[in-house]
Amino acid sequence: MSKKNTFFIFFFIAVLALIVLFSYPLNLTAYATNEEGNIIQTYGEAELTAPPDLAKIGLAIETRSKSSKEAVEENARLAKVVLDALLDYGLQEDNIKTSSYRLYSYREGQKTDSETEQEKIYYQATNEMLISTTQLDTVGEIIDLAVKAGANNINYINFELSNPQELMFQALTMATKQARRKAEAIAEGAGETIQQLYSIREERTSYTPSRSENTMLTREMAAGVATTPISPEAIIVRAIVIAEFSF
Protein backbone atom coordinates (compact mmCIF):
# COMPACT_ATOMS: atom_id res chain seq x y z
CA MET A 1 0.00 0.00 0.00
CA SER A 2 1.41 3.35 -0.97
CA LYS A 3 2.12 6.06 1.55
CA LYS A 4 -0.46 8.25 -0.16
CA ASN A 5 -3.25 5.67 0.33
CA THR A 6 -2.18 5.05 3.92
CA PHE A 7 -2.43 8.81 4.66
CA PHE A 8 -5.98 9.02 3.26
CA ILE A 9 -7.10 5.95 5.28
CA PHE A 10 -5.81 7.44 8.54
CA PHE A 11 -7.33 10.82 7.66
CA PHE A 12 -10.74 9.19 7.02
CA ILE A 13 -10.59 7.29 10.34
CA ALA A 14 -9.71 10.47 12.25
CA VAL A 15 -12.60 12.42 10.70
CA LEU A 16 -15.04 9.58 11.48
CA ALA A 17 -13.86 9.49 15.11
CA LEU A 18 -14.43 13.23 15.49
CA ILE A 19 -17.96 12.95 14.09
CA VAL A 20 -18.87 10.17 16.53
CA LEU A 21 -17.26 11.99 19.46
CA PHE A 22 -19.11 15.30 18.99
CA SER A 23 -22.44 13.83 17.96
CA TYR A 24 -22.93 11.97 21.26
CA PRO A 25 -23.25 14.97 23.63
CA LEU A 26 -25.35 16.79 21.05
CA ASN A 27 -27.91 13.99 21.30
CA LEU A 28 -27.85 14.26 25.09
CA THR A 29 -28.53 18.01 24.93
CA ALA A 30 -31.47 17.58 22.60
CA TYR A 31 -32.90 14.96 24.94
CA ALA A 32 -32.56 17.23 27.98
CA THR A 33 -34.21 20.10 26.13
CA ASN A 34 -37.00 17.78 25.13
CA GLU A 35 -37.49 16.72 28.76
CA GLU A 36 -37.64 20.34 29.98
CA GLY A 37 -40.11 21.09 27.22
CA ASN A 38 -42.87 19.13 29.02
CA ILE A 39 -44.12 22.29 30.68
CA ILE A 40 -47.56 23.78 31.28
CA GLN A 41 -47.59 27.53 31.87
CA THR A 42 -50.58 29.06 33.66
CA TYR A 43 -51.69 32.47 34.87
CA GLY A 44 -53.19 32.89 38.34
CA GLU A 45 -55.06 35.96 39.53
CA ALA A 46 -56.80 36.86 42.78
CA GLU A 47 -58.72 39.89 44.01
CA LEU A 48 -59.59 40.68 47.61
CA THR A 49 -61.55 43.57 49.07
CA ALA A 50 -61.49 45.03 52.55
CA PRO A 51 -63.00 48.07 54.25
CA PRO A 52 -60.46 50.87 54.85
CA ASP A 53 -59.37 51.55 58.40
CA LEU A 54 -57.34 54.73 57.85
CA ALA A 55 -58.23 58.13 56.37
CA LYS A 56 -55.75 60.79 55.26
CA ILE A 57 -57.02 64.29 54.59
CA GLY A 58 -54.92 66.75 52.61
CA LEU A 59 -55.93 70.35 53.19
CA ALA A 60 -54.30 73.72 52.55
CA ILE A 61 -54.27 77.19 54.04
CA GLU A 62 -53.71 79.86 51.37
CA THR A 63 -53.15 83.54 52.08
CA ARG A 64 -52.47 86.36 49.64
CA SER A 65 -51.12 89.88 50.10
CA LYS A 66 -49.18 92.63 48.33
CA SER A 67 -46.50 92.06 50.96
CA SER A 68 -44.70 88.75 51.34
CA LYS A 69 -44.36 89.39 55.09
CA GLU A 70 -48.09 89.92 55.49
CA ALA A 71 -48.91 86.78 53.47
CA VAL A 72 -46.56 84.69 55.62
CA GLU A 73 -47.75 86.14 58.92
CA GLU A 74 -51.43 85.71 58.08
CA ASN A 75 -50.78 82.16 56.97
CA ALA A 76 -48.98 81.35 60.22
CA ARG A 77 -51.86 82.83 62.23
CA LEU A 78 -54.51 80.79 60.40
CA ALA A 79 -52.39 77.63 60.57
CA LYS A 80 -52.19 77.96 64.35
CA VAL A 81 -55.94 78.48 64.61
CA VAL A 82 -56.59 75.36 62.49
CA LEU A 83 -54.06 73.31 64.46
CA ASP A 84 -55.52 74.38 67.84
CA ALA A 85 -59.04 73.56 66.64
CA LEU A 86 -57.99 70.08 65.53
CA LEU A 87 -56.15 69.42 68.81
CA ASP A 88 -59.14 70.61 70.82
CA TYR A 89 -61.30 68.23 68.77
CA GLY A 90 -59.21 65.35 70.08
CA LEU A 91 -56.61 64.69 67.40
CA GLN A 92 -53.00 64.10 68.46
CA GLU A 93 -50.02 66.08 67.15
CA ASP A 94 -48.71 62.90 65.49
CA ASN A 95 -51.87 62.87 63.37
CA ILE A 96 -51.26 66.37 61.97
CA LYS A 97 -48.25 67.00 59.72
CA THR A 98 -47.12 69.84 57.47
CA SER A 99 -46.65 68.18 54.09
CA SER A 100 -45.35 71.27 52.24
CA TYR A 101 -45.00 75.03 52.48
CA ARG A 102 -44.70 77.41 49.51
CA LEU A 103 -44.36 81.15 49.02
CA TYR A 104 -44.38 82.61 45.54
CA SER A 105 -45.13 85.89 43.77
CA TYR A 106 -47.22 86.58 40.70
CA ARG A 107 -48.36 89.56 38.66
CA GLU A 108 -51.98 90.54 38.23
CA GLY A 109 -53.35 93.23 35.98
CA GLN A 110 -55.78 95.77 37.43
CA LYS A 111 -57.65 98.60 35.74
CA THR A 112 -57.33 102.10 37.14
CA ASP A 113 -59.84 104.96 36.96
CA SER A 114 -58.39 106.00 33.62
CA GLU A 115 -59.15 102.53 32.23
CA THR A 116 -55.48 101.79 31.84
CA GLU A 117 -54.29 98.46 33.12
CA GLN A 118 -51.45 98.25 35.59
CA GLU A 119 -49.69 95.17 36.88
CA LYS A 120 -49.33 94.62 40.60
CA ILE A 121 -47.24 92.02 42.37
CA TYR A 122 -48.94 89.73 44.88
CA TYR A 123 -47.52 87.10 47.19
CA GLN A 124 -49.24 83.84 48.07
CA ALA A 125 -48.28 81.56 50.94
CA THR A 126 -49.59 78.00 50.96
CA ASN A 127 -49.33 75.69 53.96
CA GLU A 128 -50.42 72.13 53.17
CA MET A 129 -51.36 69.91 56.09
CA LEU A 130 -51.92 66.16 56.22
CA ILE A 131 -54.37 64.83 58.79
CA SER A 132 -54.70 61.11 59.51
CA THR A 133 -57.36 59.35 61.56
CA THR A 134 -58.63 55.85 62.14
CA GLN A 135 -62.07 57.18 63.10
CA LEU A 136 -63.52 57.19 59.61
CA ASP A 137 -66.93 58.37 60.75
CA THR A 138 -65.38 61.66 61.87
CA VAL A 139 -63.83 62.63 58.52
CA GLY A 140 -66.69 64.97 57.61
CA GLU A 141 -66.56 66.66 61.00
CA ILE A 142 -62.77 67.14 60.81
CA ILE A 143 -63.03 68.75 57.37
CA ASP A 144 -65.87 71.01 58.49
CA LEU A 145 -63.91 72.06 61.56
CA ALA A 146 -60.72 72.79 59.59
CA VAL A 147 -62.57 74.88 56.99
CA LYS A 148 -64.34 76.94 59.65
CA ALA A 149 -61.02 77.52 61.40
CA GLY A 150 -59.33 78.88 58.29
CA ALA A 151 -58.41 76.10 55.85
CA ASN A 152 -59.63 77.18 52.42
CA ASN A 153 -58.76 74.22 50.22
CA ILE A 154 -59.38 70.48 50.66
CA ASN A 155 -57.02 68.78 48.22
CA TYR A 156 -58.05 65.16 48.67
CA ILE A 157 -59.22 62.42 51.01
CA ASN A 158 -57.51 59.04 50.88
CA PHE A 159 -59.07 55.95 52.44
CA GLU A 160 -56.41 53.32 53.04
CA LEU A 161 -55.42 50.18 54.90
CA SER A 162 -53.07 50.66 57.83
CA ASN A 163 -51.47 47.25 57.11
CA PRO A 164 -52.03 46.19 53.49
CA GLN A 165 -49.19 43.61 53.48
CA GLU A 166 -51.23 40.80 55.04
CA LEU A 167 -53.98 41.18 52.45
CA MET A 168 -51.40 41.23 49.66
CA PHE A 169 -49.89 37.98 50.94
CA GLN A 170 -53.34 36.36 50.99
CA ALA A 171 -53.99 37.47 47.42
CA LEU A 172 -50.66 36.00 46.28
CA THR A 173 -51.47 32.68 47.96
CA MET A 174 -54.86 32.54 46.24
CA ALA A 175 -53.36 33.44 42.86
CA THR A 176 -50.75 30.70 43.19
CA LYS A 177 -53.37 28.09 44.07
CA GLN A 178 -55.45 29.14 41.08
CA ALA A 179 -52.44 28.79 38.77
CA ARG A 180 -51.85 25.23 40.02
CA ARG A 181 -55.52 24.24 39.64
CA LYS A 182 -55.47 25.50 36.07
CA ALA A 183 -52.35 23.46 35.31
CA GLU A 184 -53.89 20.31 36.83
CA ALA A 185 -57.06 20.79 34.76
CA ILE A 186 -55.02 21.21 31.57
CA ALA A 187 -52.90 18.14 32.35
CA GLU A 188 -55.96 16.02 33.15
CA GLY A 189 -57.58 17.01 29.87
CA ALA A 190 -54.43 15.95 28.04
CA GLY A 191 -54.22 12.63 29.88
CA GLU A 192 -51.16 13.68 31.86
CA THR A 193 -50.30 14.28 35.51
CA ILE A 194 -48.54 17.28 37.01
CA GLN A 195 -45.21 16.25 38.50
CA GLN A 196 -43.85 19.37 40.19
CA LEU A 197 -43.57 23.13 40.10
CA TYR A 198 -40.90 24.11 37.57
CA SER A 199 -40.91 27.92 38.04
CA ILE A 200 -43.12 30.70 39.36
CA ARG A 201 -42.90 34.48 39.50
CA GLU A 202 -44.94 37.36 40.85
CA GLU A 203 -46.22 39.31 37.88
CA ARG A 204 -47.96 42.10 39.80
CA THR A 205 -49.42 42.89 43.20
CA SER A 206 -51.35 46.14 43.40
CA TYR A 207 -52.94 48.09 46.19
CA THR A 208 -54.49 51.48 45.49
CA PRO A 209 -56.12 53.64 48.17
CA SER A 210 -59.56 55.05 47.48
CA ARG A 211 -59.12 58.73 46.65
CA SER A 212 -61.69 61.52 46.60
CA GLU A 213 -61.19 65.04 45.30
CA ASN A 214 -63.12 67.55 47.36
CA THR A 215 -62.92 71.01 45.84
CA MET A 216 -66.72 71.13 45.61
CA LEU A 217 -67.00 70.03 49.22
CA THR A 218 -64.78 72.93 50.25
CA ARG A 219 -67.00 75.48 48.51
CA GLU A 220 -70.15 74.01 50.09
CA MET A 221 -68.66 74.15 53.57
CA ALA A 222 -67.46 77.73 53.07
CA ALA A 223 -71.02 78.64 52.08
CA GLY A 224 -72.44 77.03 55.21
CA VAL A 225 -73.93 74.02 53.46
CA ALA A 226 -74.39 70.97 55.69
CA THR A 227 -71.67 68.37 55.32
CA THR A 228 -72.60 65.35 53.21
CA PRO A 229 -71.67 62.08 54.98
CA ILE A 230 -68.51 60.65 53.42
CA SER A 231 -68.78 56.91 52.71
CA PRO A 232 -65.45 55.29 51.77
CA GLU A 233 -65.31 52.61 49.10
CA ALA A 234 -63.82 49.18 49.72
CA ILE A 235 -60.09 48.80 49.07
CA ILE A 236 -59.14 46.33 46.32
CA VAL A 237 -55.94 44.28 46.38
CA ARG A 238 -54.96 42.28 43.27
CA ALA A 239 -52.23 39.72 42.76
CA ILE A 240 -51.05 37.98 39.58
CA VAL A 241 -48.54 35.13 39.24
CA ILE A 242 -47.23 33.16 36.27
CA ALA A 243 -46.29 29.56 37.01
CA GLU A 244 -44.80 26.64 35.06
CA PHE A 245 -45.42 22.99 35.98
CA SER A 246 -43.66 19.94 34.60
CA PHE A 247 -45.56 16.81 33.59
Image (spheres, rainbow, N blue to C red):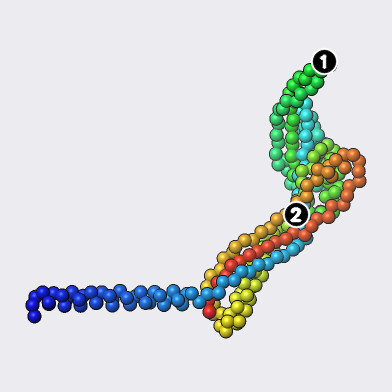
* Residue at 74% over, 35% down: 126
Q: Secondary structure at mark 1?
A: loop
**Disc 1 + disc 2, Cβ < 8 Å:** no
Question: Is any part of residue 85 visible from this angle?
Answer: no
**Is 71 placed above or below 226 here?**
above
Residue behind mark 1? 114
Q: Position of residue 91 (x, y in %)?
A: 80, 47
Q: Position of residue 19 (x, y in %)?
A: 28, 75
Alpha-carbon span between mark 1 and mark 2: 53 Å
Callout 1 crowding tier (Cα within 10 Å): few <14, some 14–19, many ≥20: few
The type of residue carrying mark 1 is Ser
**Is 241 placed above or below 220 here?**
below
Which numbered disc, 1 or 2, marks the residue that appears first in the sequence?
1
Foreground residue among 109 and 77: 109
Foreground residue among 1 and 43: 1
Q: Which mark is residue 210?
A: 2
